[in-house]
Amino acid sequence: MLNSLIPNVQWDKMWEATLETLYMTAISVFATFVLGIILGLLLFLSAKGNIWANAPVNKVISAFVNIFRSIPFIILIVLLIPFTKLILGTMIGQNAALPALIIGAAPFYARMVEIGLREIDKGVIEAAKSMGAKTSTIIWKVLLPESMPALVSGITVTAIALVGYTAMAGVIGAGGLGNLAYLEGFQRSRFDVTLVATIIILIIVFIIQFIGDFITSKLDKR
């Protein structure tokens, strides 16, 4: 019955493409989480009135974040082709998509991190300062724990965006469900292949959203 409804779907290829999408998403989400927190902390701490207040540094980081989060992802992939070839030697395959995925998503997440840090009660930070806490202690014991629900919520949104980015990267040869939907589905007029690939992407998105919401609800003390 199923084969008659979707006769063109080759499940071994679909499974392989799903694993490729999960691989690209997992690696890029982890790297984005780390880099985004670093950038977000630098944006927050170097802002006026904060621990490392430094207007020039803040403006440079802010400009970097604004530029890269504003470039449409499909254009960013093309712009980064020379860089990708330089560090990986190719622009085809799952790993070749990672630089664009990370550079495209980290600045976006960094802004979410900054917003989450700004929502922390200033009194908590001042109390830690008055007790002689070092900057590293304030970061690890105050800023990150207090903003963790917002950080998890932000990385959930970013992870879902990255799933979409992997589909776009697939169109130019990165592999994954996007590549399968485009080459095997669209170009060969096999609607069922495109449909199944889309449904699997939606399932991945729903699972990420569920996990993110669950973790956020457990971390939120309000």
Image (cartoon, rainbow, N blue to C red):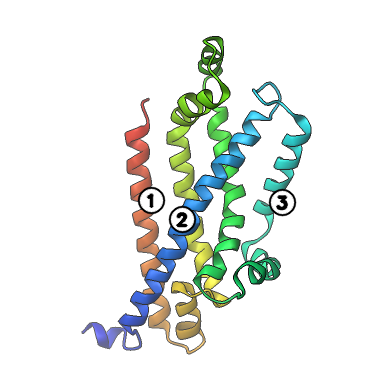
Across and down, in percent, residue 31 comes to: 51, 52
Q: CA distance from mark 3 to mark 2?
A: 21 Å
Q: Is residue 122 above or below residue 151?
A: above
Quarter of the picture holding the C terminus: top left
Q: Which residue is mark 3?
A: 67
Q: Are marks 3 and 1 in contact (CB under 8 Å)?
A: no
Q: Which residue is mark 2?
A: 160
- The local secondary structure at tag 1 comes to helix
Looking at the rendering, which quadrant does residue 39 occupy? top right
Across and down, in percent, residue 164 comes to: 50, 63
Q: CA distance from mark 1 to mark 2?
A: 8 Å
Q: CA distance from mark 3 to mark 1?
A: 27 Å
Q: Which residue is mark 1?
A: 209
Residue found farthest to the top: 130
- The residue lying at 34 percent from left, 41 percent from top is 215
Q: Are marks 1 and 2 in contact (CB under 8 Å)?
A: yes
- The residue lying at 56 percent from left, 77 percent from top is 92
Quarter of the picture holding the N terminus: bottom left
Q: Is residue 2 left or right of residue 66?
A: left
Q: Amino acid at mark 2?
A: Ile
User: Is 126 or 218 nearer to us in this picture?
Assistant: 126
